[in-house]
Amino acid sequence: MIGKQVVIIGGGFGGLTVARSLCHAEVTLIDRTNHHVFQPLLYQVATAALSAGDIAWPLRTLFRSQPNVRVVMDDVMAIDRTARVVQLRDSVPISFDALIVAPGSRHAYFGHDEWESFAPGLKTMTDAVQLREKMLLAFEEAERRRTSTGVQSQLTFVIVGGGPTGVELAGALAELGRKAMGPDFPHLRLEDLSIILVEAGPRLLPGFDADLSKKAAAALTRMGVMIKLRNPVSAVQADGVKIGQEWISSTNVIWAAGNRASSLLNTLSAPQDSFGRIKVGQDLTIPGDPWIFVIGDAAHCVGHDGKPLPGVAPVAMQQGRYVADLIDRDIAPDQRPLFVYADRGMLATIGRAQAVAQFGLVHVSGLFAWLIWCVVHIFFLIGFRNRFRVMSEWIWYYLTFKPGARLIFQRPSTVRRIPSTEHRHE
Amino acid sequence: MIGKQVVIIGGGFGGLTVARSLCHAEVTLIDRTNHHVFQPLLYQVATAALSAGDIAWPLRTLFRSQPNVRVVMDDVMAIDRTARVVQLRDSVPISFDALIVAPGSRHAYFGHDEWESFAPGLKTMTDAVQLREKMLLAFEEAERRRTSTGVQSQLTFVIVGGGPTGVELAGALAELGRKAMGPDFPHLRLEDLSIILVEAGPRLLPGFDADLSKKAAAALTRMGVMIKLRNPVSAVQADGVKIGQEWISSTNVIWAAGNRASSLLNTLSAPQDSFGRIKVGQDLTIPGDPWIFVIGDAAHCVGHDGKPLPGVAPVAMQQGRYVADLIDRDIAPDQRPLFVYADRGMLATIGRAQAVAQFGLVHVSGLFAWLIWCVVHIFFLIGFRNRFRVMSEWIWYYLTFKPGARLIFQRPSTVRRIPSTEHRHE
């Protein structure tokens, strides 16, 4: 499609891969932020192991050497299939010959959207930095009082969802609290810090085989994480969460449960599944519109086992390469090969030298799985610079247990002050 | 003073040095943030060359290996000399046998405090990160409009104050704009970007000798910075600044002019100079109170030339070591040596491979001065890790002109949304 206008919505793994793989078309990449976030490591920013800059990369810099790609930072308000334009919040509408919709997803609150404000997910850099400040401030508060009285709920972290994100977050919080924060807060009794991982289903990591779920649960328990299985959340409030019939006081409820696709997809007027994902054909297009593709978390794409593909980076990236190829080679709808996902296995890290990995029938756990995890994630980090930084960060952290990103910029009572008074020491 | 209670207000260069040098006393270090900021490099965070974590360091981690030091994160409200206690905002008052007051300073607005909200200074990490976001958003806005119409004022940066901070900030902004941002914003005409450095006096860097002032001015002019000398600011508003009789439209006015000591000092009821600094004796104590010391920017300490010492890190650190020695050795007021500042010279960087340095009669400029500047600053950065990171950052930046910390977390219109909706792509 030489000279054709290709518009990509979303600078995540899917959208980024499409843009990078398109050589001929005129590409416009739209994202609401100015950077690509390496989401699999977001939990490490939230737990102060990494700085924001370590896992994020300005989109414009990524495409410096690709003159056919234009980056627009804006919010997409709607997609007009008839007029073939994308409506933006601040910019003029952008028309397209081919459109790739990859807005990602947010968490699903199972019909209780009001819970979201009390139990935010961990999807953006803003989420991560806010969680980090909240957590660090809770430790400071407990230390200031020289007692945990009145701060138990601030020192109680409830993670809802036993998938990879929940497991990784629980493990990282346990490590931060017990190994890194411990020595720095002499008056803080570590038994006051409780980390509770809640999973509605019968086991953690439901995507993995049962033996690895057991291994992960055992490792987390050793690290002091309390695991509550078969416990659906029945209520969430600012001061705690109700799990089954039990009420847990906590000001740190983190949501890592199901996903729901972006509501932008509703403007596509195409069939959606119960999670709001678009049911795409085997060429990832929406029915009757062969040049509008939906990929990544936003797509309900059936795999060879008849189940929809999981919302993970490898799926989005493979879909991105597939779509870019169709567009670059301008392949007619009836001549398109079917998209086939090549599953290269699953990984979940639990903590220092602790991970589980599943490659088909091959199951690995412990240090070896953790090393695989490190290598894979370093390898996929975009840009040598970040790779290099993150590696040095990790080496430093795992040797010293001194997380470097433990910075509190603003204290609650100062947030409402005007910035220019922030620096007064009074 | 074995077992005596020593309280230090402020975790800047002065307070930090005292705490690190005290071996015997029971020390309480109070700061309103949880980290020490390496202020001389703050302008590099503001211009996206470095990440916040690169030049900040959690205070608790710094004192892990020093069990006699307790860190309290709180705001100091008042100092009660009679009761010998320090009043805190959130914690119980802390009593002291010896007190070191090192709250630092904020900028002086020459009786126009209302200017501060329009022309913030660059004293804290919050200032730096906010300036960075504002600047990056201005570039995005100009690119989105594909024209500078209506964004000239957003692309105009006015820096008030021709001292080292102003010069360094102007140079860094010019570099970021012309070298790093340029390639990323194809529709942005770089001639629309204007950086104006305003100095009320007859020359830049008044602290340096005239020849180096000339060299600095010449280098900045080559980099495209407009310098306005002998121009006092007569008005500052949200949409611009009045310099002499000339009105300049700018939404980015940065204040780097004079200093004013923290108003906490007013609660000491001790003689102050016109900048609010406490006039300390030759042992850095306040009159009639031999165990209350004031150091750093907060102290008016007369040097051998009869002029007050400048508000720079070396002064604060030397004063810190001096005070710690008096306390550790419990030296009676009448037996104390006088504090003498050993001036090791002055440095100011302008840009890549551009700096000026003055060591007594020895004047250096250009690449050599810049290399000295790099070595000195790397050397003084606290902790190997940060040193290592900053060095790698700089090498990367100066080789590639791709600043890594160019992340916009929140867009203005999204700031007011609740955090948990930040991640929706809609």
Image (cartoon, coloured by chain):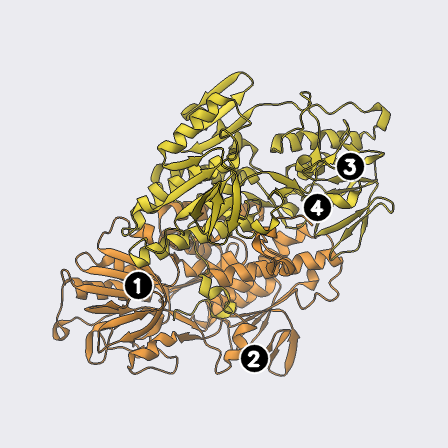
Chain colours: A yellow, B orange
| Mark 4 neighbour density, 10 Å: few (under 14) some (14–19) many (20 or more) | some
**Mark 2: amino acid:** Asn
Q: Is there one chain holding both mark 3 and mark 1? A: no
Q: Residue at x 38, y 75 (%)?
A: B261
The image's mark for residue A396 is none
The image's mark for residue A263 is 4
**Mark 4: amino acid:** Ser
| Mark 3 neighbour density, 10 Å: few (under 14) some (14–19) many (20 or more) | some
Report the residue marked by disc 2: B231
**Mark 3: amino acid:** Pro
Residue A369 x, y percent position in the rendering: 46, 25
Q: How far apart are labels 3 and 2 at the CA level?
A: 65 Å
* Subunit bearing disc 3: A
Q: How far apart are labels 1 and 2 at the CA level?
A: 36 Å
Report the residue marked by disc 1: B15
Q: How far apart are labels 2 and 4 at the CA level?
A: 54 Å
